[in-house]
Amino acid sequence: TCTHANRNAALHPLWQSELSIPGGTRQSPINIQWRDSVYDPHLKPLKIHYDPATCLYIWNNGYSFQVEFDDSTDKSVIMGGPMENHYRLKQFHFHWGAINEWGSEHTVDSKVYPGELHLVHWNPVNSTSFEEAIMENNGLVVIGVFLKLGAHHAGLQKLVDALPAVRHKDTIVEFDVFDPSCLLPSCPDYWTYDGSLTTPPLTESVTWIIKKAPIEVDETQLEEFRMLLFTSDGEEEKRMVDNFRPLQPLMNRTVRSSFQ
Ligand SMILES: Oc1ccc(S)c(O)c1
Ligand SMILES: [Zn+2]
């Protein structure tokens, strides 16, 4: 079996220099030790209302492929859970490995999944833009969903079919009418903790909501992710794989669960 050490060996140059933020006390990702998580009966069910018409385009930003949404209104929002108010959907992206043995950023009892989806939302009550929110204490809420190797995911396939059009860094393709709630597991259970972005600027502005249940995708769909490139057209090709950050110390944090 692989150890974290060799899964980290294949780190993207991006993170080799920034394995930890000096003075960081709430960095992500972390290992979620199930038995150390604390059930919080005050946590509400997550409420998710995404409008498929707010979907704009997919682009390759050199770290992942990212699906961007129109966040100029409250048409696609989440609320409830650990949140004091609603948060607007801005984008979603994924992290994955070169092989099925690793790829997720968070782990559960040190179990690694082949991939992880991040749905990124920002707080329009305390901030006037996403860019401002990433610098705020509770500026962002990111829903993390583990990808497990299994059945073909019909909802994901529409996204996978568009990936050849964004093979190189800084390429973009129109992608309209997509409802990302099809990528969420039906199980309502989640963990939540205070953390950070896992890509630069690594700011400590994220309330993480990690779904307990994974979604299933099949091998061919993961292989399509691995056909993407970190590099721009004309550069020596580097396959976009292992775009996950190493585990960060829990420090003085408690992970809460919405379930007993
Ligand atoms: O805005 C974001 C960018 C990257 C990552 S990993 C996030 O969780 C949020
Ligand atoms: Zn991410």
Image (cartoon, grey):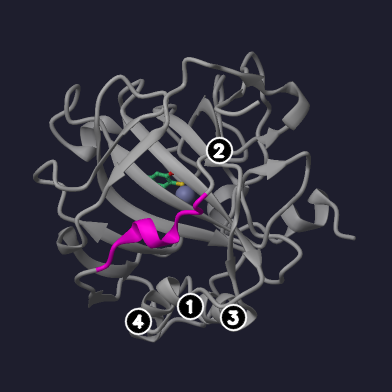
Mark 1 or mark 3, earlier in chain: 3
Classify residue 166 by image quadrant: bottom left
**Spot occupied by residue 196 in the image (x, y as percentages of width and height):** 48, 32
Asked which secondary structure carries label 2, the reply is loop
Q: Are marks 1 and 4 in contact (CB under 8 Å)?
A: no
Which amino acid, by three-letter code, is at mark 3? Answer: Glu
**Spot occupied by residue 38 in the image (x, y as percentages of width and height):** 65, 18
Mark closer to the observer (2, 3):
2
On residue 189, the disc is 2
Distance (Cα) linking label 2 and label 1: 32 Å
Mark closer to the observer (1, 4):
4
Which amino acid, by three-letter code, is at mark 2? Answer: Asp
Mark 3 or mark 4, earlier in chain: 4
Pointer 3 residue: 223
Whether residue 190 appears in magenta in the rendering, the answer is no
Asked which secondary structure carries label 1, the reply is loop
Pointer 1 residue: 228
Pointer 4 residue: 162
Mark 2 or mark 3, earlier in chain: 2
Q: Count neighbours of disc 4 (C-alpha within 10 A) and say few if under 14, some if 14 to 19, many if 20 or more.
A: some
